[in-house]
Amino acid sequence: TRKGWSGHDGNIQRFWVEGNDPVSGGWISIGRAWRGLGQQNQLLGIETDGVQAGIPIKGTGLTASAFWLTSGTGDDSNPAWYGVGTWGKLGHSVGINLDYAHREKSKSDDGAAMDNAYVLSGWWNIAKNLQFQYDYTHTNADYQNHGSFYRLNYRNTDLKKPGSYQLYARYIYSGQNGNFGGDDEWESLRISGPGNADGTKGWILGFKYVPYKNIEWETLYAHEKHLNNNDETRKLARTQVDFHF
């Protein structure tokens, strides 16, 4: 099984194929790849094995999708998720991203299964260069079964345009059982550690900048509290450079 986020354990990290139908506009992705559910990938946002397909809905700006996915770690006890979703524009400045997922029972489940979940997401272009995003996740767990993720973006980066940048502000409430494994963005959204399950609230400020073509520099500051222990607070400052090939 995986020994860390990098997957340096002998397993194939990512290997997938994609196909497109130029007539219908439909597409399919099969194999091991990073996949997300929700506008901010907060219902699910991890490396998965499986298949995902989509097709445009005629007469609308929406795409319908179906998926069957498992966690891509080579562990046979991992459960599978399957479901349906849709995303796209509702108008000139408003869009949605909706997904419903069911999780099959894992071999390691102890009876307290969290097996159904959905995410309601949307975005709104408030003004030129200003966009608001919101994700609400909900599961059928009995405790801390939802999450709310707010984000305000000013401008956006373009990897082909050196000098482009983005400023953003976020507020998150991530219940301990509020998703199936949402994107933690390099452990910046949730406090975790030995004996600590996810369950975090707090805010993040950050910026992204493209100094050269295909290079993005991001810096952020986060102030967060653990939902199950108000005395546990984390202040995180991080800067990173991503090279895209």
Image (cartoon, rainbow, N blue to C red):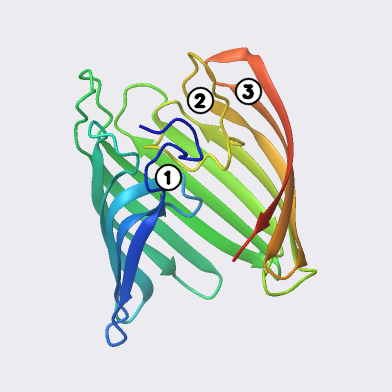
Q: Residues within 10 Å of mark 2 (few under 14, many from 20)?
A: many
**Rendered residue at 61%/56% (across/down):** 132
Location of residue 69 in the rendering, given as x and y in whole percent from the top left corner: 28, 49
Q: Which disc number belongs to residue 220?
A: none
Residue carrying label 1: 46
Q: What residue type is labelled 3?
A: Lys
Number of numbered discs = 3
Location of residue 74 in the rendering, given as x and y in whole percent from the top left corner: 30, 39
* Horizontal side, residue 189 vs residue 211: left or right: left
Q: What residue type is labelled 1?
A: Ile
For marks 1 and 3, give the CA distance.
23 Å
**Which quarter of the rendered picture does the N terminus lie within?**
top left
**Which quarter of the rendered picture does the C terminus lie within?**
bottom right
SS of the residue under disc 1:
strand
**Rendered residue at 58%/36% (across/down):** 189
Whether the residues at callouts 1 and 3 have beta carbons within 8 Å, the answer is: no
Residue carrying label 3: 225
SS of the residue under disc 2:
loop
Q: Residue 84's quadrant in the figure?
A: bottom left
Q: What residue type is labelled 2?
A: Gly
For marks 3 and 2, give the CA distance.
9 Å
SS of the residue under disc 3:
strand
Dot placed on the residue nearer the N-terminal end, 1 or 2: 1
Dot placed on the residue nearer the N-terminal end, 1 or 3: 1
Name above or below for residue 22 compared with residue 198.
below
Q: Residues within 10 Å of mark 3 (few under 14, many from 20)?
A: many
Whether the residues at callouts 1 and 2 have beta carbons within 8 Å, the answer is: no
Q: Nearer the viewer, residue 35 or 30?
A: 30
Q: Residue 201's quadrant in the figure?
A: top right
Residue carrying label 2: 199
Dot placed on the residue nearer the N-terminal end, 3 or 2: 2
Name above or below for residue 158 compared with residue 40.
below
